[in-house]
Image (cartoon, helix red, strand yellow):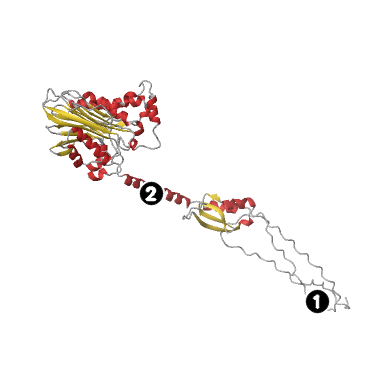
């Protein structure tokens, strides 16, 4: 089988020689930028002993750099494996993690970049697999396709718990949210396992641009039968026709008996151009002019969904229930606080006016719609209009009191304006009376009775008054004729 070219968007296939084994691999790989993305952030690698798929995540943070750097670190395993190939693979994935951390530290502009990775080392009899993220590995045996990997995604956790089905997961709004990735920050924690192989087996590694739009039956039909190159092209083409909005990358291998001729590895996608190699000197921490121009061309206002794809920790489950519970707690706390405030307010007193009269209120002088904040506790006989202007203003504004007794004292201390007394009318002089015929001696007029004051009853507070109290003076009855002085009858002998 002919070897493929190292191109970003193309196919490659080959056969690998296994001098010390009875099995060998034929392989092919193909990647396409797709019909929506502007650049290819997938990376693929297929060789004699190694198959790798990496799907870069990060959008403007250059997921292509993450995926290509990861593939470059792992491709060193494309040699005859040692006795513990699985441990070597795990260590190499961690080395890729460290390499990505170095790149981000030197170039802070790339913070947030990460990548999935699914890698398989062929030891001549089985595959040693390491897996992080939502790229997938499949094994086709006897016409039946089965999944080798488990997605590290939110929807897969929901499927595992039985809360949604596989079909529902394919259309879930958060189906692309991954929980693990190689990001240079969090430990990748790859799934590690072995897969025994048989002659005739076909292995498929693909990005979610393929597995997200094609179901197992469709992939099995396209993978079974045709040569690997045609199968790779068919899978990519079918994914695009199915409406994939992502980069699409597939890496294929077929297990053959005996030994095969040496063939060059197939490198596709971002790994073929290795953009991480074109960064400026790491010691400076700066990007090259071409890198800066590429970053500057990104419209950061239009958020690429790739930037939102990676969540290192699972989102909180039962989100709506938690929100409602939190809202209920807040409402309860507010109700308790409002009740405590209302209870306190009903123990307060203040002096103010009501309809022109000075009254004592219980509560607080405030207006709250739907809530009675105060009511009249006692009325007084004092009118606001009778108060001095200073005290009248204080009453209208409200005078706080420490309690009912203090409120009564405040009322008693209010100053009342003294009314100006009206002048008493001057009585007119009586006309002269001519001597009259002697008559019986008139008896002296009886003195008028001094009026008595009726005491006022009631306990209402009364304002103090500086005005003197006026008492009525006894006097003659108005209109009475003054009595004459008793004397002798005219003409009588003295």
Is any part of residue 164 visible from this angle? no
Q: Disc 2 on helix, strand or loop?
A: helix
Q: At 32% across and 25% down in the image, what residue appears?
A: 276
- The residue identified by callout 2 is 332
| Mark 2 neighbour density, 10 Å: few (under 14) some (14–19) many (20 or more) | few
Give left or right: position of 140 versus 370.
left
Give left or right: position of 219 versus 372.
left
- The residue identified by callout 1 is 441
Quadrant position of the C terminus in the picture: bottom right
Mark drawn on residue 266: none
| Image depth: mark 1 or mark 2 in front | 2
Residue 160 position, x and y percent, is 22, 41
Q: Disc 1 on helix, strand or loop?
A: loop
Residue 233 position, x and y percent, is 23, 35
Quadrant position of the N terminus in the picture: top left
* Res 433 quadrant in image: bottom right
| Mark 1 neighbour density, 10 Å: few (under 14) some (14–19) many (20 or more) | few
Give left or right: position of 411 versus 425.
left
Q: At 61% across and 53% down in the image, what residue appears?
A: 392
């Amino acid at each position: 089988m002919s070897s493929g070219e190292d191109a970003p968007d193309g196919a490659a296939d080959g056969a690998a020689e296994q001098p010390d084994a009875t099995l060998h691999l034929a392989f092919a790989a193909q990647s396409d930028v797709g019909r929506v993305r502007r650049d290819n952030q997938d990376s693929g690698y297929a060789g004699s002993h190694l198959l790798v798929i990496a799907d870069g995540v990060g959008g403007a943070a250059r997921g292509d750099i993450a995926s290509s750097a990861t593939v470059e670190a792992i491709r060193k395993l494309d040699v005859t494996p040692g006795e513990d190939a699985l441990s070597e693979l795990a260590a190499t994935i961690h080395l890729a993690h460290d390499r990505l951390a170095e790149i981000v530290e030197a170039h802070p502009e790339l913070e947030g970049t990460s990548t999935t990775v699914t890698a398989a080392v062929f030891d001549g009899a089985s595959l040693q697999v390491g897996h992080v993220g939502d790229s997938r590995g499949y094994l086709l045996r006897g016409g039946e396709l089965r999944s080798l990997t488990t997605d590290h995604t939110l929807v897969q956790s929901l499927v595992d718990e039985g809360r949604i089905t596989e079909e529902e997961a394919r259309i879930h709004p958060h189906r692309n949210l991954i929980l693990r990735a190689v990001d240079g920050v969090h430990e990748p924690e790859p799934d590690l396992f072995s897969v025994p192989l048989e002659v005739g087996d076909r292995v498929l590694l693909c990005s979610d641009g393929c597995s997200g739009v094609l179901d197992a039956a469709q992939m099995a039909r396209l993978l079974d039968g045709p040569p690997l190159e045609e199968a790779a092209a068919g899978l990519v083409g079918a994914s695009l026709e199915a409406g994939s909005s992502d980069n699409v990358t597939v890496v294929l291998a077929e297990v053959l008996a005996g030994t095969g001729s040496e063939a060059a590895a197939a490198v596709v996608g971002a790994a073929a151009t290795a953009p991480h190699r074109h960064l400026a000197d790491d010691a400076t921490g700066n990007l090259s002019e071409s890198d800066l121009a590429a970053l500057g061309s990104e419209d950061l206002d239009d958020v690429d969904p790739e930037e939102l794809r990676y969540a290192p920790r699972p989102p909180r489950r039962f989100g709506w229930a938690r929100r409602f519970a939190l809202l209920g707690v807040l409402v309860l706390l507010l109700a308790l606080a409002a009740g405590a405030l209302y209870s306190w307010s009903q123990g307060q007193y203040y002096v103010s006016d009501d309809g022109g009269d000075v009254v004592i209120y219980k509560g607080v002088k405030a207006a709250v719609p739907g809530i009675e904040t105060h009511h009249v506790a006692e009325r007084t006989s004092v009118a606001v209009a009778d108060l001095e202007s200073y005290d009248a203003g204080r009453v209208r504004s409200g005078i706080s009191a420490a309690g009912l007794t203090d409120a009564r004292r405040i009322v008693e201390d209010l100053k009342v304006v003294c009314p100006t007394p009206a002048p008493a009318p001057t009585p007119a002089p009586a006309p002269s009376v001519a001597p009259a015929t002697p008559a019986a001696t008139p008896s002296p007029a009886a003195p008028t009775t001094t009026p008595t004051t009726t005491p006022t009853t009631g306990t209402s507070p009364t304002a103090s008054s500086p005005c003197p109290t006026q008492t009525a003076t006894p006097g003659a009855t108005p209109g009475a004729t003054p009595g004459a002085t008793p004397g002798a009858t005219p003409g009588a002998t003295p």
